[in-house]
Image: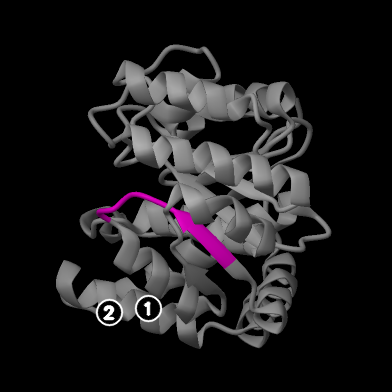
């Protein structure tokens, strides 16, 4: 496989401009711990979040949305049932959907559920190195929701998982790697402070779902989502004193980022 290539920022600028113009509606069936930050990250970036969780409504809404996120962080039978309904409706309507396999490989229930969901052909999969290694069958299990492996160690697994599933796979860490199984982008932006605020990884998965809505190039869209979060993480850290102020500064950075700024950085 060719080596990963750093994502050009003009691609990020184009994808951000597209998202801002379209303001996609994103259906979040997500971790109950991270609903607030996920919704606020989408709003700050320019998308519209909605959290419809009842089995009676999940399918109808998934068919209406521009993108769907399935995050198994706080999984239980009723939530999994709604997820199945939403995914099937999204597939029938042509709605792209993203899987965040939180802590897969650590516990059997969520691992089995994620393997079942992958058979329904997600558009994108976003996880840390341990999660991607486990999903791809390369072994690996994290410490709860945290990875015990670096993202570089999971690039081959991500590429294999992309080829096996047809999904765009993003393995995130110090550097994020995003692949369709043939081409792999690297997004080297970010800051360790992103790991000190609950839910930034899950919020990134919500951002991936937003960027894939109506995307003409899904590989570029997923990579742009990763780049936007990383760049804004760097800007937020420079404007904050610690995790508390960082969370607010991250939302401000996402709101203030614009395509012109990205093109200037790329010049």
Horizontal arrangement in the rendering, residue 213 relative to residue 52 (left or right): right
How many C-alpha atoms fall within 10 Å of the one at disc 1: few (<14), some, or many (≥20)? many
- Which residue is at the front of the view, 111 or 158? 111
**At numbered mark 2, what does the secondary structure look like: helix, strand or loop?**
helix
Q: What stretch is highlighted in magenta?
A: 26-33
Horizontal arrangement in the rendering, residue 72 relative to residue 256 (left or right): left
Q: How far apart are marks 2 and 1 (CA)?
A: 5 Å
Q: Which residue is drawn at 74% across and 66% down?
A: 11
Residue 92 quadrant: top right
Residue 214 at what x, y percent from top left? 76, 63
Q: Which residue is drawn at 53% across and 60% down?
A: 27
Residue 251 shows which numbered tag?
1
Residue 106 at what x, y percent from top left? 30, 21
Can you name the residue that lies furthest to the right here? 216
- The relative height of residue 267 versus residue 64 in the rendered view (above or below) is below
C-beta proximity under 8 Å, tags 2 and 1: yes
Residue 171 appears in the rendering: no
Q: Which residue is drawn at 71% across and 69% down?
A: 15
Residue 248 shows which numbered tag?
2
Number of marks present in the image shown:
2
- The relative height of residue 222 versus residue 73 in the rendered view (above or below) is below
- Quadrant, the N terminus: top right
Can you name the residue that lies furthest to the front here? 56
Horizontal arrangement in the rendering, residue 248 relative to residue 153 (left or right): left
How many C-alpha atoms fall within 10 Å of the one at disc 2: few (<14), some, or many (≥20)? some
- Which residue is at the front of the view, 97 or 129? 97
């Amino acid at each position: 496989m060719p080596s990963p290539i750093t994502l050009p920022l003009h691609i990020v600028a184009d994808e951000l401009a597209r998202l801002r113009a379209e303001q996609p509606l994103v259906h979040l069936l997500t971790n109950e711990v991270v609903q607030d930050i996920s919704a606020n990250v989408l709003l700050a970036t320019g998308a519209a979040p909605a959290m419809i969780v009842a089995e009676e409504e999940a399918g109808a809404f998934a068919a209406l949305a521009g993108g769907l996120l399935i995050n198994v962080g706080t999984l239980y039978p009723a939530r999994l049932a709604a997820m199945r309904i939403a995914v099937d409706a999204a597939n029938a309507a042509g709605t792209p959907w993203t899987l965040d396999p939180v802590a897969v490989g650590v516990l059997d229930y969520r691992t089995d559920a994620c393997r079942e969901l992958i058979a329904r052909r997600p558009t994108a999969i976003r996880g840390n190195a341990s999660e991607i290694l486990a999903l791809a069958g390369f072994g690996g299990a994290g410490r709860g929701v945290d990875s015990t492996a670096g993202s570089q160690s999971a690039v081959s697994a991500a590429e294999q998982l992309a080829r096996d599933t047809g999904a765009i796979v993003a393995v995130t860490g110090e550097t994020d790697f995003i692949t369709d199984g043939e081409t792999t982008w690297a997004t080297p932006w970010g800051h360790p402070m992103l790991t000190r605020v609950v839910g930034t990884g899950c919020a990134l998965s919500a951002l991936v779902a937003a960027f894939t809505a109506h995307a003409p190039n899904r590989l570029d869209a997923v990579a742009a989502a990763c780049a936007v979060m990383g760049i804004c993480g760097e800007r937020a850290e420079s404007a904050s004193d610690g995790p508390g102020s960082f969370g607010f500064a991250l939302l401000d950075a996402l709101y203030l980022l614009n395509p012109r700024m990205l093109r200037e950085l790329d010049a």
